Amino acid sequence: MATKDRGMTLNTFRKSLEGKLRSLVRRRFSRKIVTDHGLALEKIGSGYGGWTVPTNLIRPDWICYCGGVGEDITFDLGLIARFGCRVFAFDPTPRAVAHVEQQAADISLFHFLPVGLWSEDKALRFFAPRDPAHVSHSILNLQETSDYFEAKCRSLPSLMAELEHRRIDLLKVDIEGAEHEVVRSMLKQRIHPTVLCMEIDQPVPPFRFRKTIGRVLDSGYKLVALDGWNFTFVTDEALAAAGAASRH
């Protein structure tokens, strides 16, 4: 067998093995989903951009941070329409910026900053997807492309200081692989949103997948919903309160 063909075969085998391991890890964590919780779980937003959240917890005074906009802000706008809470969205992608200007320019409770989320304030490269029809770019270059743009990234503590927020009640991160670093940093800084919605973007090494989810669970959260690779967590404290309320 030619060296090139052998390399392709080994690469295909490696990707297949990693895919199977990721599926095993996902099934392992799916068994940790808490079902006896008294939460009114419901998917808010479109089939593509929506997220499952505990609707009986969210209140009008909640502060919601949504990392990753793309060209679907139905979840962000759904939080506003359904609960009347303030939503702060972040995405530096030019097409995302244009989408927000078109869809939410006159919505007073929706606030948008064209920055990426990261563990520190710095400019980073955002690499393009392989399919030019797709909008999401990746700091981690998940699709191994060469085209990119540079944009400013911000840490959650930095954004909270600028926006004068002492807490985040709901955090959604759909940020093309950067979720691992952002969540790690967030927990280290003792920022604990009541609801954490996190997509584990693919491909990802199984050990990183396992470590990130395990880190969240070890930080006082329970997994309450799993939709594809979208994980919804709720703090133990909020879960206990919801359970107590449902028994009265």
Image (tube, rainbow, N blue to C red):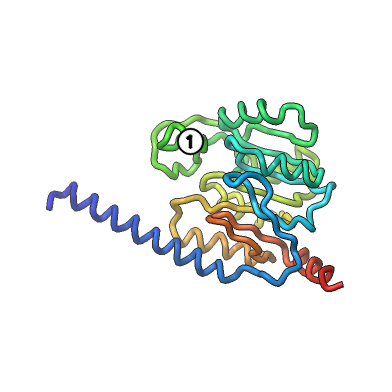
Rendered-image quadrant of the C terminus: bottom right
Left or right: 25 as drawn, with respect to 197: left
Q: Nearer the viewer, residue 82 or 17?
A: 82
Whether residue 227 is visible: yes
Q: Residue at x 50, y 67 (%)?
A: 27
Q: Is residue 199 above or below residue 101?
A: below
Q: Residue at x 72, y 51 (%)?
A: 170
Q: Nearer the viewer, residue 3 or 48?
A: 48
Left or right: 56 as drawn, with respect to 156: right
Q: Is residue 128 above or below residue 176?
A: above
Q: Nearer the viewer, residue 187 or 58?
A: 58
Left or right: 67 as drawn, with respect to 164: left
Residue 62 position, x and y percent, is 80, 48
SS at circle 1: loop
Residue 32 sits in which quadrant? Answer: bottom right
- Amino acid tagged 1: His
Q: Residue at x 48, y 36 (%)?
A: 134
Whether residue 153 is visible: no
Q: Nearer the viewer, residue 46 or 130?
A: 46
Residue 120 position, x and y percent, is 61, 43
- In the picture of the structure, the residue carrying the numbered disc 1 is 134
